[in-house]
Image: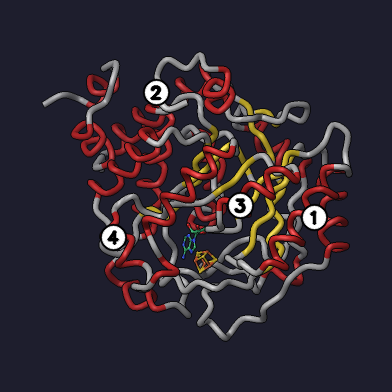
Amino acid sequence: MMTVDEILDQPELSRADMIRLLSISDDHEQKALIRKAYSVKTKTVGQKVYLRGLIEFSNLCRKNCFYCGIRNDNHKINRYSLSEDEIYRITAYAIQQRFTGIVLQSGEQNSPAFTKQLASLIAHIKKMANPPLRITLSVGEQSYETYQEWFNAGAERYLLRIETANESLYHKIHPDNAVHSFQNRLQCLENLQKIGFQTGTGVMIGLPFQTINDLADDLLFFKNRNMDMIGMGPYLVHSDTPFARFSASLLPSGERFRLSLRMIALLRIIMPDINIVATTALQTIDPTGRESGLLAGANVLMPNLTPITYRDNYLLYDNKPGSKEEELSDEFDSKLQQIGEKIEYNNYGDSIHFTKRNSHDCISCDNN
Ligand code: 5AD
Ligand code: SF4
């Protein structure tokens, strides 16, 4: 049998190689994988971190994903939507903190009023800074026309996680109805790419019923679909969700954490020029989880700028950190310096993969 180092020395990894690497249980092997991913990262995107300020501007959601704490049927939370002024104030703070971009995230809403309000918000935010902020949206499945309207208004990036690339697993983690359609999710990702968004997706790691093979297929999905950005983190239980009943059958949280790091590391190795987020979910399991994510190959952080008074109502899972503290650039600066990483303030940090796709010099991309 090949050693982990021998597997990693090959020019390309097969699905079987990925399954073998995702199944690592030995500490030395885990370290070897992470070391390799970090050396790939150093050579491609560098030891640099890009900050995007996350604004969870509304927890209204029409969906009922079985795993999520802000699902429509959870009546224990207070529903909120930030006013335009509140959003502008937070944006001004992000600019003052020298962030080059913000992420506007909410549950999935699809009224015409929502579409219009978001379009006007985007247009206004674009004028707030010079050079303008990059705007990322993360507001779920929408029509082609709606995506186009927001793109025209000035949003350049979109995050829409596939959650799992296995259609039958997708149906196990979502209700069986037209609002939760795997095919529509795929169509939305295609539409976003066609419109010209830097497109991000991702999955949860350690879901009930999920196998290592599923995770290898998730990585192949990202690559085959030419994604520009990926955010993925461990699945975490929220006690007021239907999936809370599977708590006892999950991988232990330490193992889910290490598996998440292996996913990030492998992704960096097979997609060296994309942007990868070190997610809040990683930090929930381990207080230094985000730093570990960066050392495994991630290069983006999304500090939470949602006002503290609203945060308890945007708990996707239990123990989500930061519901009581502000996140400041200065603190990140010193934490990251300690691990040899540096925040880039004068650079948008667009996905290099996206930039190459659009300059038509990407030899490995056939659908650009
Ligand atoms: N654990 C981890 N991640 C979750 N998300 C939603 N619920 C959970 C959970 N319980 C993730 C989903 C979604 C993103 C906004 O948050 O992947 O796309
Ligand atoms: Fe709504 Fe997203 Fe939560 Fe699903 S994961 S219930 S779409 S906020």
Disc number lying in front (1 or 4): 1
Outermost residue, bottom side:
75
* Residue 312 or residue 60, whichever sits in front: 60
Residues at marks 3 and 2, CA–CA distance in whole angstroms: 26 Å
Q: Earlier in the sequence, mark 3 or mark 2?
A: 3
Residue type pointed to by label 3: Glu
According to the picture, the residue beneath numbered tag 1 turns out to be: 121
Residue type pointed to by label 4: Leu
Tell me the tag on residue 366.
Answer: 2
- Please say which color scheme the image uses: secondary structure
Disc number lying in front (3 or 4): 3
Residues at marks 1 and 4, CA–CA distance in whole angstroms: 36 Å
Q: Earlier in the sequence, mark 1 or mark 3?
A: 1
- The picture places residue 212, in percent across and down from the top left corner, at 25, 48
Residue type pointed to by label 2: Asp
Residue type pointed to by label 1: Leu
Q: Residue at x 64, y 70 (%)?
A: 59
Residues at marks 1 and 2, CA–CA distance in whole angstroms: 35 Å
According to the picture, the residue beneath numbered tag 3 turns out to be: 145
Q: Residue at x 54, y 52 (%)?
A: 283
Residue 293 appears left or right of 209: right
